[in-house]
Image: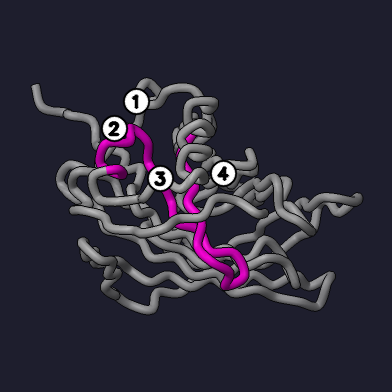
Amino acid sequence: MHILRYSALFIASLSIFSLSGCTDNFKSALDSIQIARELNKGTEITTEYIAATPYASSLVTINDAKPILLILGLAEQNPTNAAYQLTWIAEDKGTIVTENGRIIHTTGFDTSNLETLLIKGQQLSLPGQSSSWQAIYDWSPGYRYNFSADITSMSLGMETIVTDLWTQQAEHIQEQVAFNSLNSKIINDFWVAPETNSNKPFVVKSIQYLGPNMDKVEMLMVKPFIEQKLNTTN
């Protein structure tokens, strides 16, 4: 994935990035791609630029390479659990789709792509909400479908995520994903920002592997998609 490069990164308070959970807040995915292309031409990514861009964005590092910037192009609710599936778009039209902070689908990676991540017998929850469960992984290219994984989760406590201009307390959740049929396992890490009076919890940072011996993807939500709570007062 030879996606977008950035020249500088400065971001402001998380509070100015709160977005309601509604697809009306986003223009078309084509507009998102156009913004990514403009950045690829050398537009400097400053505090002012990010604040003025009407899109959430994620700073992504693949296999410890130079960070790249992905723009949120689409937010669609999963009808089974009402969670938002977020499509992050790169300049070359490669994508990463996340749900509750978990990568569930990718396109444009050079070797392997994650076609589907499903949870057996339950809904895909936010990291830390379940201690153990089973998942099904599908990968492409090739006929690599229906690989079962046993997942165990544990909290490593609260940590502080620090960028140039904002600081966020988050719970560090680590998940061990064991593929018994492949005699292999991966370790995924998530940092979950806690629920507030107005916002639902969300994954502010993650380090995830697409599968055994596959790409490592680190995502930092420099301009997060934060789902607001519904106002229940009369």
Looking at the image, residue 84 lies above or below residue 183 = above
Using the numbered discs, state the Cα–Cα distance from disc 2 to disc 3 in whole angstroms. Answer: 27 Å
Q: Residue furthest left?
A: 234
Q: Residue at x 28, y 66 (%)?
A: 163
Q: Residue at x 36, y 58 (%)?
A: 204
Where does the magenta region start and end?
Answer: 49-73
Using the numbered discs, state the Cα–Cα distance from disc 1 to disc 3 in whole angstroms. Answer: 23 Å
Q: Earlier in the sequence, mark 3 or mark 4?
A: 3
The answer to the question of whether label 2 and label 4 lie on touching residues, with beta carbons closer than 8 A, is: no
* Residue 68 within the magenta-colored segment of the rendering: yes
Write down the residue under mark 1.
25
Q: Earlier in the sequence, mark 4 or mark 1?
A: 1
Left or right: residue 15 compared with residue 54? left
Using the numbered discs, state the Cα–Cα distance from disc 3 to disc 4 in whole angstroms. Answer: 15 Å
Q: Position of residue 231 (x, y in %)?
A: 17, 29
Decide if residue 86 is in sight here. no
Mark 3: secondary structure = loop
**164, 194: nearer the viewer:** 164
Write down the residue under mark 4.
90
- Marking on residue 20: 2
The answer to the question of whether label 1 and label 2 lie on touching residues, with beta carbons closer than 8 A, is: yes
Task: Give, as a three-letter code, the residue at label 3.
Answer: Thr
Write down the residue under mark 3.
43
